[in-house]
Amino acid sequence: MNKAMQQGFTLIELMIVVAIVGILAAVAVPAYQDYTVKAKLTDAVAISDPGRTALAIACSDASLASGMTNTSFNLPATITSNNVSGVAVAGASSVSGTVTITMNAIGSAIASGSTIIYTGTCSGSGMRWAVTGSGVADKYLPKT
């Protein structure tokens, strides 16, 4: 009595593996896309650091004033990168200022011209920041 050994996989085993791979892909691809958008927004946050630092220094020096711009803070007039079309630093008053980051398009998640706005307010303990965005979903906005 020769019993033949089973070789290969049965159809049901292959179907189960394909189903598992499909479920994993359905979860992983959107998560990866969100991750790549957040990684590219990290560039925007990093490139705006000098502007936020300049506002905080002006706040602590009591030299912050309405009408101040990038050049008033000794920053380049144009600040850009692959994902950012511009960073504008502005003094709004003697106790507040803004850093507006204008984005280039990032896939279909962020349209060209969308903005991230850091609004800083002077307080006894330094500059307090609030972040808002126009055209940028809340899940992508950086934390303060």
Image (tube, helix red, strand yellow):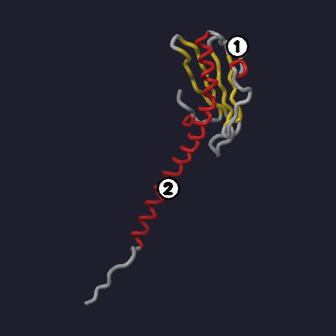
- Identify which amino acid the numbered label 2 is placed on: Ala
Q: Is residue 133 depicted above or below 12 in this figure? A: above
Q: Residue at x 42, y 64 (%)?
A: 17
Q: Quadrant of residue 57?
A: top right
In contact (CB < 8 Å): disc 2 and disc 1: no
Instruction: Read off the residue under disc 2.
Output: 25
Helix, strand or loop for disc 1: loop
- Identify which amino acid the numbered label 1 is placed on: Ser
Helix, strand or loop for disc 2: helix
Q: Is residue 61 left or right of residue 19?
A: right
Q: Residue at x 68, y 23 (%)?
A: 89
Q: Quadrant of residue 131?
A: top right
Q: Is residue 80 left or right of residue 53?
A: right
Query: Residue 97, image x and y in percent?
Result: 64, 18
Q: Residue furthest bottom?
A: 1
Query: Residue 125, image x and y in percent?
Result: 51, 13
Query: Residue 133, image x and y in percent?
Result: 62, 30
Instruction: Read off the residue under disc 1.
Output: 66
Q: Residue furthest left?
A: 1
